[in-house]
Image (cartoon, helix red, strand yellow):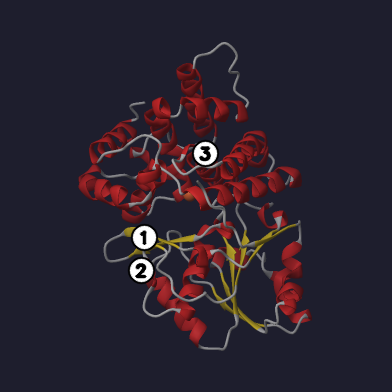
């Protein structure tokens, strides 16, 4: 048994952000709040969109206070900004943090209380304000998912708010926006997308639709991430990576994720470690832990990654997958241990509790206890693979 629900209109076209004015005009929108960060704004990435707003007589305001691992206080500031004018749409423009912040502001625009009141699954009552998501990195897939992750600044817990109502109305996938993404961000966000595709594919809730999409995302990432890293201005690699991150987002919007995201979100909340890097460093440890529970899937993942599987046992193939991820991390200058990321084991009890609180542990293919999470955190800290 499975359901597949995905209401977002996807527009995949290079330079399509310069048509957003027209798209909003056709939706009878007159005034939008653009949610972004200062880096993206100062880089001029929004200019073609602003020009299209002017052509279509769409008024706009800008909220540019998004930070990595966005906090509930930032959502409050964004909601305050929203209340200063009569906006009828929101555009989240940037990395996953900008899109997640825009989603949260759109929810509170039409629902009572604060965003953290809606932690969990299916708690949102009213349809959020009309939302357009425009990613500038190829990683989070947030433009096509039903969740937003917001950090509670009092407890440093990254809370997931999940509801079919959170899917953006429109996703604009314009690869020209990712051409200037620096190599370090290209690789860490690309590894986040790889983690989404792998965790979705082996999730207990994987189904034939999400699984096919996830495998294709793994193939695209394996074929194009390195080129995008080394040759960032190559449009084809950027398009394929943006497509891959969107596909991985589609897949995990249906299945949730697994132990990598459960643990990495605790690292993000407590130590503010960048999400993609935390995932990349944890991925080999969790894959090794999961392998005995999903050897058949590991063979398919290996094939999608271009790994030679001829005359090898499932266990050996799983080892090769883990080794390949370790090699990619080395190539991308991502540590293969979590100590170097700034994890402090003095916080281990909180890290375990926060990881177990994440719903992602429940769909991880191998049954996972708090003791298992502790071992994964300790082993990854010490680089004991
Ligand atoms: Fe992620």
Separation (CA) of disc 2 from disc 1: 7 Å
**Is mark 3 in CB contact (under 8 Å) with mark 2?**
no
The mark that comes first in sequence, 3 or 2, is 2
Q: Secondary structure at mark 2?
A: helix
Image location of residue 58, percent across then percent down: 70, 83
**Is mark 2 in CB contact (under 8 Å) with mark 1?**
yes
Residue designated by label 2: 116
Image location of residue 151, percent across then percent down: 37, 62
Residue designated by label 3: 201
Query: What residue is at 76 percent from the left and 56 percent from the top?
Result: 14
Q: Secondary structure at mark 3?
A: helix
Local packing at callout 3 (Cα closer than 10 Å; few below 14, some 14-19, many 20+) is many
Relative to residue 223, is residue 129 depicted above or below? below
Residue designated by label 1: 159
Local packing at callout 2 (Cα closer than 10 Å; few below 14, some 14-19, many 20+) is some
Q: Which quarter of the figure is the C terminus placed in? A: top left
Residue furthest to the top: 311
Q: Is residue 227 left or right of residue 55?
A: left
Label 3 or label 2, whichever lies nearer to me, is 3
Relative to residue 333, is residue 6 depicted above or below? below
Separation (CA) of disc 3 from disc 1: 23 Å
Image location of residue 240, percent across then percent down: 69, 44
């Amino acid at each position: 048994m499975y359901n597949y629900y995905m209401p977002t209109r996807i527009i995949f076209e290079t330079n399509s952000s310069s048509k957003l004015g027209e798209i909003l005009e056709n939706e009878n929108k007159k005034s939008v709040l653009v949610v972004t960060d200062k880096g993206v704004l100062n880089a001029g990435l929004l200019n073609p969109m602003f020009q299209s707003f002017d052509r279509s007589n769409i008024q706009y305001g800008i909220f540019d206070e998004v930070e990595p691992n966005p906090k509930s206080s930032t959502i409050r500031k964004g909601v305050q900004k929203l209340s200063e004018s009569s906006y009828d749409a929101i555009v989240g423009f940037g990395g996953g943090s900008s899109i997640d912040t825009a989603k949260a502001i759109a929810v509170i625009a039409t629902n009572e209380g604060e965003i953290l009141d809606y932690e969990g699954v299916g708690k949102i009552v009213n349809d959020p304000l009309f939302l357009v998501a425009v990613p500038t990195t190829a990683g989070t897939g947030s433009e096509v998912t039903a969740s937003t992750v917001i950090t509670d600044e009092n407890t440093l817990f990254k809370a997931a708010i999940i509801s079919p109502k959170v899917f953006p109305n429109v996703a604009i996938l314009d690869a020209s926006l990712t051409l200037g993404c620096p190599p370090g961000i290209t690789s860490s966000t690309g590894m986040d997308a790889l983690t989404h595709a792998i965790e979705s594919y082996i999730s207990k809730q994987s189904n034939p639709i999400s699984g096919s999409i996830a495998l294709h995302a793994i193939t695209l990432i394996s074929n194009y991430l390195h080129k995008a890293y080394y040759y960032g201005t190559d449009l084809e690699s950027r398009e394929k990576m943006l497509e891959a991150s969107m596909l991985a987002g589609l897949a995990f919007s249906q299945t949730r994720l697994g132990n990598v995201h459960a643990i990495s979100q605790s690292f993000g909340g407590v130590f503010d470690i960048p999400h993609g890097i935390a995932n990349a460093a944890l991925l080999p440890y969790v894959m090794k832990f999961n392998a005995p529970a999903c050897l058949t899937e590991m063979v398919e993942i290996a094939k999608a990654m271009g790994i030679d599987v001829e005359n090898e046992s499932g266990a050996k193939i799983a080892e090769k997958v883990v080794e390949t991820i370790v090699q990619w991390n080395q190539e991308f200058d991502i540590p293969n241990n979590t100590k170097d990321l700034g994890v402090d084991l003095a916080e281990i009890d909180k890290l375990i509790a926060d990881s177990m609180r994440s719903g992602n542990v429940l769909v991880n293919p191998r049954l996972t206890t708090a003791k298992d999470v502790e071992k994964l955190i300790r082993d990854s800290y010490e680089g004991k693979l």
